[in-house]
Amino acid sequence: MTGYDREVHVAAVGTALPGPPVDNAALARVIGSESVFEQWIDTFIGIRTRHLSVDLETGEIHYSLADLGETAGRRAMSAAGVTPDDIDVVVMGTATPDALMPATVNLIADRLGVNEVPTYQLQSGCTGAVQAIDVAARMLRGGPYRTALVLGGDVCAKHVDLSVDFSRLAPSELVNMILFGDGSGAVVLSVDPPPAPVALREVLVRFVGRGRPPGQVVEWFGMGDRADGRVALREDFKAIEEQVPGLARATLEELLRAQGWIGADLDYLLPPQLSVRMTDEIVKHLGVHRATPVNCVADIGNAANALPFFQLEQLLPMMRPGDRAVAIAIESSKWIKAGLVLERV
């Protein structure tokens, strides 16, 4: 096949998490009000564990995004049976790069031994991984490239201040400590079919934030504005609860329409991984009852741009010839709906 007719396949996935899982009891000991706090997490959030790049006892940061991205990329490349010389393009999506410069994608490419290829880093919230897949897939379909390494992940450790009085934090700040975990993922995309090919049928990315106030703000402070009173992270969780289910449904309907499918044609659904409770509600709202949901947020927390790769890692071994799957991601900082369609061929 030539030109834009070339089919793109998912060759392999790799993931990486920092350190051991941190359960709610360990988190509650840091924040305080242990019994009340644990009950609140269980009732309203549902996340059991998450992995953090920061040591909650000492405040020391043990892992960077480059560390995790290197591990995930190496695992994906090994599973796909490709070498650094086989990689034609590298694309990364993240909301929390290690620094403004150099770009984290280039640090990872260097560590993996990839050189003399185009590299791109997309700054985005929870749709960044899908956006990176979209860019890579378009480059593969159009040629002359054959193999792409796509990375995604986030490390929020730089925003964790263990010296604060957590009892004085507003819910919009405290919820971030509970929801989010750190991690990274990678996928190798190729126009050369692997032994058990899973075709990337469609990728959807749509900005839908016109007229909508941000649902989340993450500041990046320089030396000149560190003391101006702004908080590093704040989240309008109520707006997210109200907006995400409808956006997820609109994404699903648009992806199905593009394939000429209906909900009953789906075998697997990879829903947005916000919290356990919200994800369960979104699945109910989507109404795709025949499709098996693929979830991981209960065990790794909301690892943002790493989450689609953990879902894909679960999904690929389960897919049989003819199986179809849709993945959905919603970015709430300024509202993007995104998703992709996979089919085992």
Image (tube, rainbow, N blue to C red):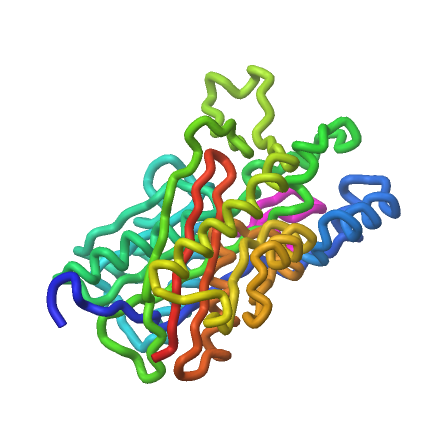
Q: Find the magenta span and give its range.
A: 50-63
In the image, residue 246 lies at what x, y percent? 54, 45
Left or right: 57 in relation to 309: right
Q: Residue drawn 50% across and 79% down?
A: 318
Quadrant in which the N terminus is drawn: bottom left
Left or right: 162 in relation to 206: right
Frontmost residue, 85 versus 291: 291
Q: In this view, does 101 lie above or below 196?
A: above
Could you say which quadrant of the image residue 174 lies in?
A: top right
Give the main secondary structure of the magenta stretch: loop
Quadrant in which the C terminus is drawn: bottom left
In the image, residue 211 lies at what x, y percent? 45, 26
Q: Can residue 51 be seen in this view?
A: no
Q: Does the magenta stretch include residue 139?
A: no
Q: Residue drawn 66% across and 42% down?
A: 177
Frontmost residue, 334 versus 300: 334
In the image, residue 273 lies at what x, y percent? 57, 54
Q: Can residue 229 be seen in this view?
A: yes
Frontmost residue, 64 versus 181: 181
In the image, residue 255 lies at what x, y percent? 39, 58
Q: Residue drawn 61% across and 54% down?
A: 285
Q: Residue drawn 27% across and 71% down?
A: 83
Frontmost residue, 106 versus 4: 4
